[in-house]
Image (tube, rainbow, N blue to C red):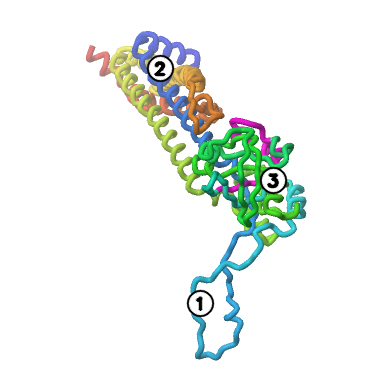
Amino acid sequence: MKINLTITIAKSLLLARWKQTLIAAIGVTFSITMFITLLGFMNGLNELLDGLVVNRTPHIRLYNEIKPSKKQPIEQLKTSDIQHHFIHSIKPNLGRTNIYNSLAIIEALKHKKEILGVAPKVTAQVFYNVGSVDITGVINGIDPEVEKKLFVFDDYIPAGNSMYIKNIPNSIILGKGAADKMMVGIGDNVQVTTSKGERVSLKVVGFFQSGIQDIDKVQSYCSIATTQKLLGVDNNYITDIQIKLHDINQAPLLAKKYGEIFEIDALDIQTANAQFETGSSVRTTISFAVGITLLIVAGFGIYNILNMMIYEKMDSIAILKATGFSGQDVRNVFLTIALSIGFFGGIFGLIFGFSLSALVDQIPFNTPALPTVKTYPVSYNPFYYFIGCTFAIITTYFAGLFPARKASKIDPVIIIRGK
């Protein structure tokens, strides 16, 4: 049977019971709309949560880890076979915490094609002095220009400017939690005591707020030069080398490689945030499962409607087969009906899904923990729209396949004789 004729007959059957057709199409449209909206919102939320960690975490971190001594001096003493040394609680050795030959390592890494950027950092353990009270803190010495480029540093500064720590001597961007605890504002001075007992006055030029309260109570930022001055070290003193890659999935392999080449400890982002990534993947799986369930439920609705249509159109099917239409022709007619419902329902579902997602994206979402977030996060990944449209077609195809096969097996003689 010609395609045009199949489409004409399918159109006639669809319009003859247009209310049922409309209900089936609305079911598909609603399912696709909610699938797109739910997936967009859930993954937008995942991207927001991932960003809180991933944006501020290097793909690879090179550093010197404090380790216990593998051998004690007493083990070097020659003893007889009947003598044994029992050593407990082996203490860490006096190894250096800074990276040896750090500037040469940074220069070598900058020429690696797989690396997007390299950011040096100096970490200093300090105490914030508030009267007679000392509050534990950590000052990170950074290059603000590099941090802005690689780690979107400015997005986490609700007040002040990241470049101030570079342009203003002895300045600090204070963690918001620490600033609230000490009741200081921009322009105030804070007293800081280093682990070596040196006390320095630093001017507050901004606040840092990551959205993770435990971090904001401790972390603060100065320029590399200011931090080195606090510690009383030279300008070659670097404790961390942060690496951002073009492909984050290469981090575990390259971390091992760089650790062996430069004889240094290396930590990749997957290892550092394994639990967080697991939670993100679980949330994504749940949202996909709920969305696909909606589509399958809509498929059962289409199946029931087509089944009812077959019973109501027994006379029409019998006439078609009596006038020379084969069972395959009848099957194609009902498959065309099902696919038409799926196609048009899917198209409208994509349109409404995008519109509803855009509406959610405009709803105000203000929280003190995330000052840079103004509305609910929504992802507009085209992949979700492709999945939604594909599942709409596949679901309606299988929903129409079994009723279509039933219709193709109807014996016109039995139907006409019964009438």
> Depth-wise, is mark 1 or mark 3 nearer the camera?
1
Q: Give the spatial CA distance, label 1 vs label 3.
A: 41 Å
**Rendering quarter of residue 195:** bottom right
Residue at horizontal 59%, vertical 41%?
Answer: 56
| Sequence-first disc among 2 and 1 | 2
Residue at horizontal 63%, vertical 39%?
Answer: 189
Is 139 or 82 nearer to us in this picture? 139
> Is label 2 in a helix, a strand or a loop?
helix
Image: magenta residue range = 137-162
Report the side of 60 relative to 12 (left or right).
right
Residue at horizontal 44%, vertical 34%?
Answer: 288
Residue at horizontal 41%, vertical 28%?
Answer: 395
Whether the magenta-drawn stretch holds residue 75 is answered as no
Q: Residues within 10 Å of mark 2 (few under 14, many from 20)?
A: many
Q: Is residue 417 visible?
A: yes
The residue identified by callout 1 is 87
User: Compared to 411, does 144 lie above or below?
Assistant: below
| Sequence-first disc among 1 and 3 | 1
Is 116 or 242 nearer to us in this picture? 242
Q: Is residue 241 visible?
A: no
